[in-house]
Image (cartoon, rainbow, N blue to C red):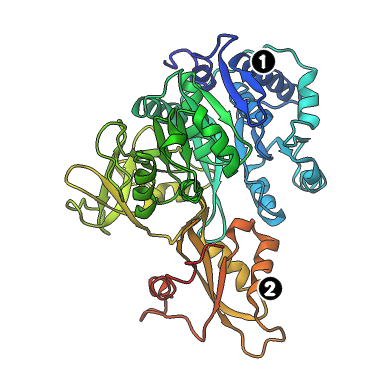
Amino acid sequence: MSLETNHNLYCCFSAKGSDVGSLLLKTDVGVTYSYADAHRQSSQIACGLTRLGLKPGDRVTVQVEKSVQALWLYLACLRAGLVFQPLNPAYQAGELHYFLTDAAPKLVVCANHNEPLFDKFAKELGIPNVLTLDADGSGTLMKLAECCPPEFNTVHRDPDDLAALLYSSGTTGQPKGIMLTHRNLFENTKTLVDAWSFAEQDRLLHALPIFHVHGLFVAIGCAMMSGASMCWLAKFDIGEVMRHLPECTVMMGVPTFYTRLLEVEGFSNDCCDNLRLFISGSAPLLKETFFEFEQRTGYAILERYGMTETGMNTSNPLTGERRCGTVGLPLPGIEVRAVNESGEAIGHDEIGDLQVRGANVFKGYWRKPDKTIEDFTEDGFFNTGDKCSISSDGYVTIVGREKDMIISGGLNVYPKEVELILDELDYVKESAVIGVSHGDLGEAVVAVIVPAKGAIAEPNEQVVIAAVKEQLAKFKAPKKVLFVDELPRNTMGKVQKNVLRERYAQCCDVTP
C-alpha cells in the first residue's frame, strides 16, 4: 500500500477492493454496492465535474444529507483532484454565506429545497455552478453523471496537494478553513488501519454523518483502505443499529451512541457475538458509560482522540490496557507532548497544553497564514488548545479545552459564536455560554444571561432558544437558559466560566 506514483488518496481506496465481487456497503434497506460500483459511479461524477470546467485545486462545497451518492461525490472529488468541502446540513443562511465567501468554490452541491438559496448566493458571489443531490440519490448531479462514461483517469496529486477543506467553528465567531492534504489523510488512515487491524473480512457499522472527520475520513477511510465493507445507515436510529449490529464486526460512534444502546433493555453480549471492536470518539466518554458497557457486553470500548486539524492523534490499544478516562497512547509516527505556558515540556501527570506533530497534522488555515504561524511552534508542533496530562507510561488524559469549546453529541460548539447571537437580542445585557455534563449528549449547551433593564420584551427561555435556532444550526442552540443578576468576573473583568460550570454543573441532569 503506497503512493509512489500518484499520491491521490483514491488510489489506496481502490487497491484492495477492485474485484467486481467485493462488497463495499449494504444500506439499511438491503441494497448492496460493490467497490466496482464505487469506481464506476465516481468515474461518471468526476467526468461530469470536469465537463463543467472544474480543475484540480478547485473547491466543491457540499451540503447534503447522507447518501450513497454523496459518498460517490466525495470519491469523485478526490479522483478529479478537487478540494472537497463538506458542510453540516443544519447550517443556516448566515453561516453558509460566510463559508461560500471564504472558500470561493467553483461548484456547490445542495439539497433540492435549498437550491433557490444557493442560486442567490452563487449570483452574488460569482460561483459558476450549483447542482442538487437529495437523500434518495435524485437531483441534477446524478443526471449529469448519467451522461458520462464509466471510466476516468484519476488525476495525479502531489503529497501536499489539498484533498479537503473543513471549517471549524470560530472562537471569535469566524470559522477557520482547515486545509487537509492527500498525505495527511493517507498517513492517518493507514496508521488507523494498522492500529485497529482492519481487514477485508471486517464489516463496519457506519451510522455517523459524513460531513465530519469521524464519519468521512476515519470510518470510510479505514473501511476502504483495508477492503472492508460497511453497513451503511442513513443516521443513528437505535432500532436499525440493534437490527444490523449482529452482522458487523466493528462499530464506530460518539459517546451518545453508546449511552443510547445502554438504554435498550435487551442490549447485551448476545447482540455482539460477531463484534470484535467498539470505538468511541469526537467527545469524552464518561467513565460510567465505559464500565456499564463492559459489564453489559464484556467489551471495553476503545476510546481515541483526534481533531479536525490532525485526524487521530492517540488511541487506546487494540491489544493491551484500554485505560478508562484516557484517550490512550500516541499513534505510531505521531509525537505528543504537554507544555507549560512558556512552551517548556512538563513532567508526567502534570497538566499542560497538548501539542502534536506528525504527517497527520494539517497544512494550515485557509487564507489565514498569520493564524497558521500562531498555532504552530518553531519546531513544528501544533498547539491543539486542549489541556492534558501524560502518564509515565504514555497514556494521555484530556482534562479540558483552553478555548472553552463544547462538544455536544460529538459536534463542536464554540461559545463565542452563540454569545454573539445572544448579545444582539434587545432583552439581553450580556451572556456567557458554557458546556455542562449531559447524560445523552456528553455536554449540553447552556446560556447564562443577564437581562437588560428596561427592555420592552421579557426574557423567556423558549424565545431565546428559538432566536438562536433562527441563525445557527440547531445543535448549537442552548438546551437550557438561566437568568442571573450578574456574571462572575475576575480582577481583570473576565467572565469566570469555570465558576459558572461549577455552579450549574447539575442543571441538565435530566435527559430530555
Residue at x 49% of width, y 39% of height = 214
- Would you say 196 lies left or right of 79 here? left
Tally of numbered discs: 2
Question: Looking at the picture, which amino acid does disc 2 mark?
Answer: Val
In which quadrant of the rendered view does residue 38 lie?
top right
Q: Amino acid at mark 1?
A: Arg
**Crowd around label 1: few <14 · some 14–19 · many ≥20 (10 Å):** some
Task: Determine the residue located farthest toward the bottom in the rendered image.
Answer: 454
Q: Can residue 183 be seen in this snapshot?
A: yes
Q: Nearer the viewer, mark 1 or mark 2?
A: 2
- Foreground pick, 484 / 29: 29
Q: Nearer the viewer, residue 39 or 235?
A: 235
Residue linked to disc 1? 40
Rendered location of residue 343, percent (x, y):
26, 53
Q: Earlier in the sequence, mark 1 or mark 2?
A: 1
Q: Residue at x 60, y 21 (%)?
A: 79
Residue position marked by numbered label 2 in the rendering: 463
